[in-house]
């Protein structure tokens, strides 16, 4: 059975996050440690990384036979140890840079709209 559009988008976003490497022009190597919906604590010796969550979605009619669907995603930047705050800020900048590469994720979405990171360090995105 084919993956749902939602799964295709989540897979595309995860793949994009995994490109966040200094060798690719980013500030960090956070792309080497990307998880979905991770619930376990970050280990003291674990490399900084990203947690992707597809949190919810909205749907609304925009005309006869047309609907607008918005998938809300969050990306949490996680680091433990010395220099954590600066590392998290660099990772957050990398996430925004990665999202801007192609905001349609290969035509799966019409656009991606990031919102500023929250106090919890998560970036929120509406993909629709």
Image (spheres, grey):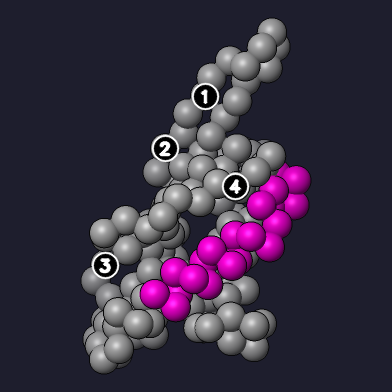
Magenta residues (range): 89-108
Q: Is residue 67 left or right of residue 94?
A: right
Question: Which residue has dot 3 on it?
Answer: 40
Mark 3 closeness class: few <14, some 14–19, many ≥20 residues within 10 Å: few
Examine the image and state in which quarter residue 69 appears: top right
> Magenta segment: does it hold 12?
no
Q: Secondary structure at mark 2?
A: strand
Q: What residue did someone put label 1 on?
A: 59
Instruction: State the separation of the CA atoms marked 3 and 4.
Output: 28 Å
Q: Which residue is mark 4?
A: 112
Q: Residues within 10 Å of mark 4 (few under 14, many from 20)?
A: some
Q: Secondary structure at mark 3?
A: loop
Residue located at (44% from left, 78% from top): 90
Q: Earlier in the sequence, mark 3 or mark 2?
A: 3
Name the one closer to the observer, 11 or 30: 30
Number of labels in the image equals 4
Disc 1 + disc 4, Cβ < 8 Å: no
Residue at image x 30%, y 89%?
A: 83
Depth check, front residue: 73 or 39? 73
Residue at (64, 60) in percent of width and height = 100
Residue that carries the numbered disc 2 in the rendered image? 56
Q: Alpha-carbon distance for marks 1 and 4?
A: 15 Å
Indicate the quadrant containing the C terminus: top left, top right, bottom left or bottom right.
top right
- Name which of mark 1 and mark 4 comes first in the sequence: 1
Q: Are marks 4 and 2 in contact (CB under 8 Å)?
A: no
Cα distance between the residues tagged 1 and 3: 32 Å
């Amino acid at each position: 059975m084919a993956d749902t559009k939602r799964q295709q988008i989540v897979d595309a976003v995860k793949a994009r996050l995994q490109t966040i490497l200094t060798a690719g022009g980013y500030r960090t190597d956070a792309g080497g440690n990307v998880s979905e919906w991770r619930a376990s604590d970050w280990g003291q010796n674990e490399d900084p990384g990203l947690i992707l969550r597809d949190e919810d979605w909205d749907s609304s009619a925009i005309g006869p036979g047309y609907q607008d669907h918005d998938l809300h995603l969050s990306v949490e930047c996680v680091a433990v140890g010395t220099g954590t705050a600066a590392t998290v800020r660099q990772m957050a900048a990398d996430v925004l840079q990665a999202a801007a590469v192609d905001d349609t994720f290969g035509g799966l979405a019409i656009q991606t709209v990031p919102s500023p990171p929250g106090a919890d360090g998560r970036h929120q995105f509406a993909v629709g």
